[in-house]
Image (cartoon, helix red, strand yellow):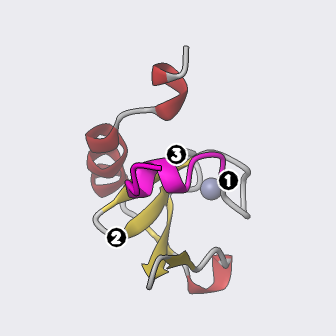
């Protein structure tokens, strides 16, 4: 275990659309372009509730998703 957050949450999917989530600045961001929900991580525990999630603007979402890269791409 590397302890890296993006490894830690691998396989965790968005409760709203079931897309993969990526870690971006202490948040989990949904990779679904239609969805773009951002979930807070508190004390290492992600709040995977659509109710407490924030919907990112498309530009912001793109930055978040690009930065971490797609785990699906890397897993090939
Ligand atoms: Zn989603």
Q: Residues within 10 Å of mark 1 (few under 14, many from 20)?
A: some
Q: Quadrant of ligand 1?
A: bottom right
- Residue denoted by label 2: 26
Q: Write down the quadrant of residue 14 in the picture.
A: bottom right
Which residue ends up furthest to the top in the rendered image? 76
Q: Secondary structure at mark 3?
A: loop
Using the numbered discs, state the Cα–Cα distance from disc 2 to disc 3 in whole angstroms: 15 Å
User: Looking at the image, which residue is at 57% across and 47% down?
Assistant: 10
Look at the picture and state if 66 lies above or below 9. Answer: above
Q: Which residue is rendered at x = 31% and y = 51% of the image?
A: 64
* Residue 44 higher or lower than 59, as above or below: below
Mark 3 residue's CB less than 8 Å from ligand 1: yes
Q: Is residue 63 left or right of residue 53?
A: left
Horizontal side of 17 relative to 7 (left or right) equals right
- Measuring from the top left, give residue 8's x and y in whole percent: 52, 55
Q: Which residues are magenta?
A: 1-13
Residue 13 tag number: 1
- Disc 2 versus disc 3: nearer the observer: 2
Relative to 10, residue 74 above or below = above
Mark 1 CB within 8 Å of ligand 1: yes
CA gap between label 2 and label 1 equals: 16 Å
């Amino acid at each position: 275990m590397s302890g890296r957050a993006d490894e830690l949450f691998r396989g965790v999917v968005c409760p709203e659309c079931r897309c993969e989530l990526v870690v971006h600045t202490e948040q989990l961001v949904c990779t679904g372009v239609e969805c773009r929900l951002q979930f807070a991580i508190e004390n290492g525990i992600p709040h995977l509730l659509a109710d407490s999630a924030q919907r990112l603007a498309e530009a912001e979402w793109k930055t978040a998703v690009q930065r971490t890269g797609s785990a699906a791409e890397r897993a090939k």
